[in-house]
Image (cartoon, rainbow, N blue to C red):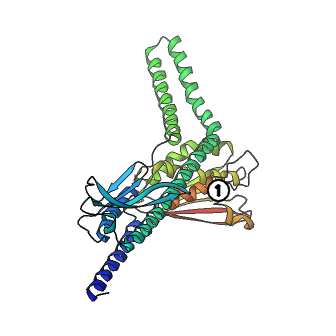
């Protein structure tokens, strides 16, 4: 082989290696979504072929189609399929214009390179689909957990609504029977207050139970804590449990989905309620340290046995009787906290209670 041919072949190998490196880098770029990655990969592939200015790379995944340039007809191409769960889901192709180019213009090494590139795309797609499945499972768990929480709150909420609705009915009857205008105005004012209270309870319930896309926004955690406790007060009262609220003044905001934060608060407090006897206390506090907001829920209940402490964040693990708990609560809390860049830990002592501490990053 002449020296010039050796140099040309070496240059081709360098192009191929650089292409594989660039595509591996693109695949791991977390700032790009799946479609952006595939388009960027298609744009990069064409530069690795001998006739770069004429090559057009094409990637097809299901109904999605990505090309590095204009596909001219007719064309000559080489193609490699890729698979997911042993099912063909797409292909990677490189085209040359025909009849200017023929199949003989594709180098032997380019066939091998295309196979490697198809494997890279297959790995990327597989990782994407598995992550998609995990996210669907997490959303399903969060939804089921919210339904379980609503079941916990039902009795207390029914009582919470019955009181203002009873007032509305009673004062409406007074108005219907009454003759004096001043008393009528007072009764009407009480009806309005009771109706507003009932409406707020229903509004909070609907807000928590609705199925909405995740929406991260700037949130006042103290406000969410207080709003959550409004719905939990009837449950606390029925269990004869006192709640101490220690909220840091001027607490910085965080960026989080407010429904998911409510879910975290509900789960931690309900967990403490279940672990506590009547006439006990639960403490909920907020503070911040450095770049972190800290939410703490502390009870003086039965504590967590040492032999199950490493299981409390596992899905479907519960110490409750069959039919009394889904076993999703703390697992969902863990998932939500981690998803928002935070972390959670707990300390526990038998017969002296448990403290859960959630740390979430402050808003920039």
Residue 167 picture quarter: top right
Is 219 on the left-hand or right-hand side of 8?
right
Is 54 on the left-hand or right-hand side of 13?
left
Residue shown at 40% from the left, 71% from the top: 113
Residue shown at 52% from the left, 18% from the top: 172
What secondary structure is marked by label 1?
loop
Residue shown at 53% from the left, 23% from the top: 168
Residue 303's x, y, as percent?
A: 71, 61
Residue 333's x, y, as percent?
A: 57, 56
Pick whichever, 178 or 207, lies toward us: 207
Q: Quadrant of the C terminus?
A: bottom left
Q: Can residue 339 be seen from the camera position used here?
A: no
- Taking 260 as reference, is 194 above or below it? above
Pick whichever, 198 or 191, lies toward us: 198
Residue 281's x, y, as percent?
A: 65, 54
Residue 57's x, y, as percent?
A: 32, 61
- Taking 234 as reference, is 57 above or below it? below
Pick whichever, 53 or 136, lies toward us: 53
- Residue with the mark numbered 1: 315
């Amino acid at each position: 082989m002449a020296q010039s041919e050796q140099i040309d072949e070496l240059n081709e190998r360098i192009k191929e290696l650089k292409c594989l490196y660039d595509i591996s880098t693109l695949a791991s770029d977390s700032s790009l979504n799946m479609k952006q990655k595939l388009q960027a990969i298609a744009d990069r592939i064409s530069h690795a072929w001998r006739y770069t200015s004429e090559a057009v790379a094409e990637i097809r995944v299901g109904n999605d189609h990505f090309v590095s340039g204009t596909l001219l007809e007719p064309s000559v191409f080489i193609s490699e399929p890729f698979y997911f769960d042993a099912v063909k889901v797409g292909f990677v192709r490189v085209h040359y214009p025909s009849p200017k180019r023929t199949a003989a213009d594709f180098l032997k090494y380019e066939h091998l390179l295309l196979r490697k590139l198809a494997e890279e795309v297959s790995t990327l797609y597989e990782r994407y689909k598995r992550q998609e499945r995990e996210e669907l499972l997490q959303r399903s768990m969060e939804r089921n957990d919210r339904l379980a929480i609503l079941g916990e709150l039902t009795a207390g909420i029914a009582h919470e609504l019955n009181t203002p609705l009873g007032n509305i009915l009673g004062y409406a009857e007074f108005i219907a029977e009454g003759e004096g205008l001043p008393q009528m105005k007072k009764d009407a004012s009480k009806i309005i207050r009771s109706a507003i209270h009932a409406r707020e309870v229903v509004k909070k319930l609907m807000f928590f139970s609705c199925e909405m896309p995740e929406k991260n926004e700037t949130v006042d955690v103290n406000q969410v804590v207080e709003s959550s406790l409004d719905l939990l007060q009837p449950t606390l009262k029925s269990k004869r449990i006192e709640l101490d609220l220690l909220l840091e003044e001027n607490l910085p905001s965080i960026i989080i989905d407010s429904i998911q934060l409510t879910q975290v608060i509900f789960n931690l407090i309900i967990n403490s309620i279940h672990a506590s006897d009547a006439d006990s206390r639960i403490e909920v506090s907020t503070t911040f340290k450095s770049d972190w907001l800290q939410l703490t829920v502390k009870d003086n209940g039965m504590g967590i046995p040492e032999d199950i402490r490493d299981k409390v964040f596992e899905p479907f693990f519960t110490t409750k009787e069959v039919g009394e708990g889904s076993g999703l609560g703390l697992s969902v809390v863990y998932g939500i906290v981690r998803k928002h860049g935070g972390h959670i830990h707990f300390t526990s002592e038998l017969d002296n209670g448990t403290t859960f501490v959630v740390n979430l990053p402050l808003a920039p």
